[in-house]
């Protein structure tokens, strides 16, 4: 099957196309091994400590999740650079490029929402800075800040919102956009069988 590259596109190794999906799969495995229930904020940190110290290989599962998340952000960004520099985003693949941009944003949202879930000091202050940055957006900043935090301050409501986004909403969004992305790749003939 011949590859159908856009006119004027430079060819690059396709090795940069596959690793982000493997990293996403590495993210799924530890997530499925951990409980999917919310908990009160005062128990969240203790739960992380319990998983890391008392659950067999809990520290390892948490490490896999952390490093796979970091790798996924890097690999998705490198994949986007490869598509950009090889001009594989040109007609008729503009919509595929836009779905990739959305997937990059969702990947970043996974990282941001997951960072608060251990409910420790580092997570609190990182979320404080991130939501303050969103809050400085002209005209809609205060609305974004209150929507993300669930109020003026970072509280248990913030933890609940981030947990729901991280475990329920974002996986659905990424699955829909990955499906669309792969469908468009197959339709336009960018790669062989996936």
Image (tube, helix red, strand yellow):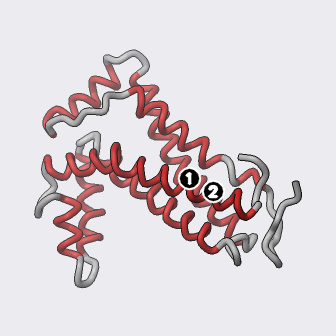
Q: Look at 46% across and 37% down and name the residue there.
A: 65
Looking at the rendered structure, the secondary structure element under dot 2 is helix
**Dot 1 alpha-carbon crowd within 10 angstroms: few under 14, some 14 to 19, many 20 or more:** few
The answer to the question of whether label 1 and label 2 lie on touching residues, with beta carbons closer than 8 A, is: yes
Q: Quadrant of the N terminus?
A: bottom right
Is 3 on the left-hand or right-hand side of 120? Answer: right
Q: Look at 70% across and 61% down and name the residue there.
A: 187
User: Which numbered marker is on residue 179?
Assistant: 1
Q: Look at 34% across and 25% down and name the residue there.
A: 52
Place of residue 106 in the rendered image (x, y in percent of width and height, measured from the top left): 44, 58
Place of residue 69 in the rendered image (x, y in percent of width and height, measured from the top left): 48, 45
User: Which numbered marker is on residue 30?
Assistant: none
Of residues 46 and 97, which is closer to you in this image?
97
Place of residue 128 in the rendered image (x, y in percent of width and height, measured from the top left): 23, 59
Of residues 188 and 131, which is closer to you in this image?
188
- Residue at the farthest bottom position: 139
CA gap, disc 1 to disc 2?
6 Å
For disc 2, the marked residue is: 183
Is 76 on the left-hand or right-hand side of 122? Answer: right
Q: Is residue 114 above or below residue 43?
A: below
**Dot 2 alpha-carbon crowd within 10 angstroms: few under 14, some 14 to 19, many 20 or more:** some
Place of residue 129 in the rendered image (x, y in percent of width and height, measured from the top left): 27, 63
Q: Is residue 57 above or below residue 116?
A: above
Which quadrant of the figure has residue 2? bottom right
Q: Look at 13% across and 36% down and name the residue there.
A: 42
Which quadrant of the figure has residue 55? top left
- Residue at the farthest right position: 2
Is 92 on the left-hand or right-hand side of 64? Answer: right
């Amino acid at each position: 099957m011949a590859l159908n590259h856009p006119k004027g596109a430079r060819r690059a190794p396709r090795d940069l196309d596959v690793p982000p999906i493997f990293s996403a799969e590495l993210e799924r495995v530890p997530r499925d091994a951990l409980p999917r229930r919310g908990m009160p904020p005062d128990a969240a940190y203790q739960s992380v400590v319990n998983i890391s110290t008392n659950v067999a290989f809990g520290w390892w599962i948490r490490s896999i999740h952390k490093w796979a998340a970091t790798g996924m952000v890097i690999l998705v960004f490198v994949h986007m650079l490869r598509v950009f520099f090889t001009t594989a985003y040109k007609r008729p693949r503009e919509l595929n490029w836009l779905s990739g941009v959305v997937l990059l944003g969702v990947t970043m949202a996974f990282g941001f929402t997951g960072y608060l879930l251990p409910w420790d000091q580092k997570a609190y202050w990182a979320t404080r800075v991130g939501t303050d940055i969103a809050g400085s957006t002209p005209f809609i900043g205060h609305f974004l800040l209150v929507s993300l935090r669930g109020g003026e301050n970072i509280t248990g409501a913030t933890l609940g919102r981030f947990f729901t986004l991280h475990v329920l909403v974002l996986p659905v969004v990424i699955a829909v956009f990955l499906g669309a992305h792969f469908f468009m790749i197959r339709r336009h003939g960018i790669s062989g069988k996936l």
